[in-house]
Image (spheres, rainbow, N blue to C red):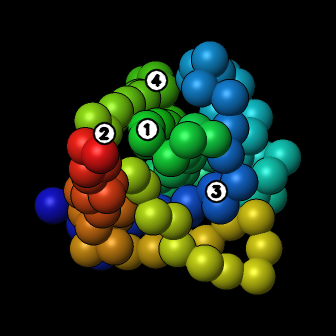
Amino acid sequence: MIPAHVRIFVCTEPVDFRRGFDGLALAARERLGEDPRAGGLFVFTNRRATGVKIVWLEPTGCCLLYKRLHQARVVLPTGDGPGVRIDGAELARLLQGVPRPTRSAA
């Protein structure tokens, strides 16, 4: 469980998933207007909403979590700007995704 004091920011615009640590930290700064070195988790999704990357910087380095959803899609929270702040419970729901509709054979 993520402690309640940890700030979690979700970028509501998809990013290129070829980006790694530095590219996602730059996206946190440019798109969300947040300094990743100030702490917090920064959540990004790809264009098809089938993957999630979370980046956070610590004093000793940078961490990256990548989850690929096979039978689900990420549903991002809505907001007025390019980013939304959420809590740990909302992050858990986001990482779970929602099932994709199954295709019936015709």
Residue in view at x 67 percent, y 80 percent:
79
Pick whichever of labels 1 and 3 is earlier in the sequence: 3
Q: Which mark is residue 69?
A: 2
Tag 3 secondary structure? strand
Quick check: 83 left or right of 70?
right
Look at the image and tell me whether residue 76 can be seen: yes
For the residues marked 1 and 2, what is the alpha-carbon distance in whole angstroms? 6 Å
**Sequence order check, earlier mark of 1 and 2:** 1
**What numbered label is drawn on residue 51?**
1
Marks 4/2: CA distance? 27 Å
Q: Residue furthest right?
A: 30
The crowding category of the residue bearing disc 4, from other C-alpha atoms within 10 Å (few below 14, some 14 to 19, many at least 20), is few
Label 2 environment density (alpha carbons within 10 Å; few <14, some 14–19, many ≥20): some
Mark 2 and mark 3: span between their CA atoms?
Answer: 18 Å
Looking at the image, residue 78 lies above or below residue 31: below
Contact (Cβ within 8 Å) of mark 1 with mark 2: yes
Chain-order first, disc 1 or disc 4: 1
Mark 2 secondary-structure assignment: loop
Which labelled disc corresponds to residue 11? Answer: 3
Q: Mark 4 falls on what kind of element?
A: strand
Distance from the alpha carbon under mark 3 to that under mark 4: 22 Å
In the picture, the disc for residue 61 is: 4
Amino acid of disc 4: Gly
